[in-house]
Image (cartoon, rainbow, N blue to C red):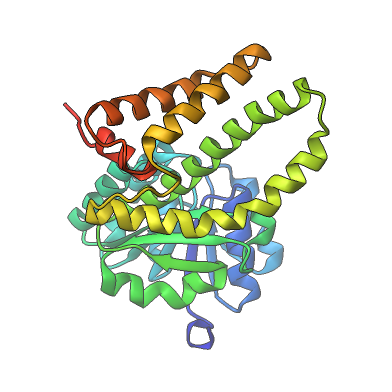
């Protein structure tokens, strides 16, 4: 990280995350210029040594690299419109939430204004910025990313996902979605466990202990999908489909929601009907590929 010390950086957006980013850069010795639409939020960084820009355009002009940490892509578009030609010759790094399509549009805007662009997404909490507890996903032009990587590493653990500016958003959205998909299923399962009179904390402790076992499974499933070679990972689908009947009956007899279990059972039945009952759970992916 020593090669990036004293490298000037601007930060636009002084919400919780943007302020944490600016303070971290200041603590690491970077001359830091900040700007926020609401001026008092930016001025709060002055005591920490930040220079306060009077406009977004002047903030971008003040440093070779500008990090944008804004509420959403609407705010991002407003800032880019205000920056305009001041972006020419500068590198813009976005840490703003948004879709892959929005990231690609921002990249096109930057290119059209003579600027380089790297899109980024943050997984972590503002108090942890500057530590390995924060993970940052980046994508965009490889050479541009390499040039700013030493600065970005000051903020947490970083990973580069390719030249398509949208890939960081794909990574972020997919990682978050996995968490929500798991957790909503877990909440419904806790409803079942509590309804049956078992101890929630003891059950949750057992679940926590078994999670590491899924690491090998998810890797194996990705390999199977990529090769289109589906072994009986969790067991053959014809056996799993019979188990699903028991799971559904258990939930419904206890008055617990079973929509997701019925969806899984329906997918299994379709795959078995296609003559693939000897394959495993990962083969259900073939049904998702059949988009109109």
Can residue 94 be seen here? The reply is no
The answer to whether residue 291 is above or below residue 121 is: above
Q: Looking at the image, which residue is at 26% across and 55% down?
A: 226
Along the line of sight, the residue nearer the viewer: 50 or 157: 157
Q: Quadrant of residue 271?
A: top left
Q: Looking at the image, which residue is at 60% across and 13% down?
A: 252
Residue 261 image position (x, y, % from top left): 50, 25
The answer to whether residue 127 is above or below residue 82 is: below
161 relative position to 185: left or right: left
Can residue 28 be seen here? The reply is yes
77 relative position to 216: left or right: left
- Total marks in image: 0
Q: Quadrant of residue 142?
A: bottom left
Which quadrant: the C terminus?
A: top left
Residue 92 image position (x, y, % from top left): 36, 60
Residue 6 image position (x, y, % from top left): 53, 82
Q: Looking at the image, which residue is at 43% across and 59% down?
A: 137
Along the line of sight, the residue nearer the viewer: 25 or 164: 164
194 relative position to 292: left or right: right
Along the line of sight, the residue nearer the viewer: 157 or 61: 157
Along the line of sight, the residue nearer the viewer: 74 or 57: 74
Residue 133 image position (x, y, % from top left): 63, 63
Q: Quadrant of residue 204?
A: top right
């Amino acid at each position: 990280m020593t090669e990036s010390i004293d490298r000037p950086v601007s930060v636009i957006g002084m919400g919780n995350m943007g302020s944490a980013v600016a303070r971290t850069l200041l603590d690491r010795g970077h001359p830091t210029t900040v700007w926020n639409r609401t001026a008092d939020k930016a001025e709060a960084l002055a005591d920490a040594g930040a220079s306060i820009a009077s406009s977004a355009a002047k903030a971008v002009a003040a440093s070779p690299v500008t990090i944008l940490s804004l509420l959403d892509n609407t705010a991002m578009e407003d800032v880019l419109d205000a920056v305009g030609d001041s972006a020419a010759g500068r590198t813009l790094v976005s840490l703003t939430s948004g879709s892959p399509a929005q990231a690609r549009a921002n990249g096109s805007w930057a290119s059209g204004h003579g600027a380089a662009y790297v899109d980024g997404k943050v997984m972590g909490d503002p108090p942890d910025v500057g530590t390995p507890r924060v993970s940052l996903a980046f994508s965009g032009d490889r050479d541009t990313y390499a040039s700013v990587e030493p600065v970005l590493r000051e903020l947490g653990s970083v990973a580069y996902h390719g030249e398509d500016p949208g890939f960081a958003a794909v990574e972020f959205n997919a990682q978050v979605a996995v968490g929500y998909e798991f957790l909503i299923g877990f909440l419904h399962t806790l409803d079942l466990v509590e309804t049956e009179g078992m101890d929630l904390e003891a059950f949750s402790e057992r679940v926590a202990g078994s999670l590491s076992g899924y690491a090998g499974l998810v890797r194996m499933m990705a390999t199977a999908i990529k090769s289109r070679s589906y072994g009986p990972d969790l067991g053959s689908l014809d056996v799993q489909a019979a188990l699903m009947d028991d799971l559904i009956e258990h939930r419904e007899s206890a008055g617990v929601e079973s929509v997701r279990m019925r969806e899984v059972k329906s997918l299994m039945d379709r795959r078995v009907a296609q003559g693939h009952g000897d394959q495993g759970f990962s083969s259900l992916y073939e049904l998702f590929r059949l988009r109109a």
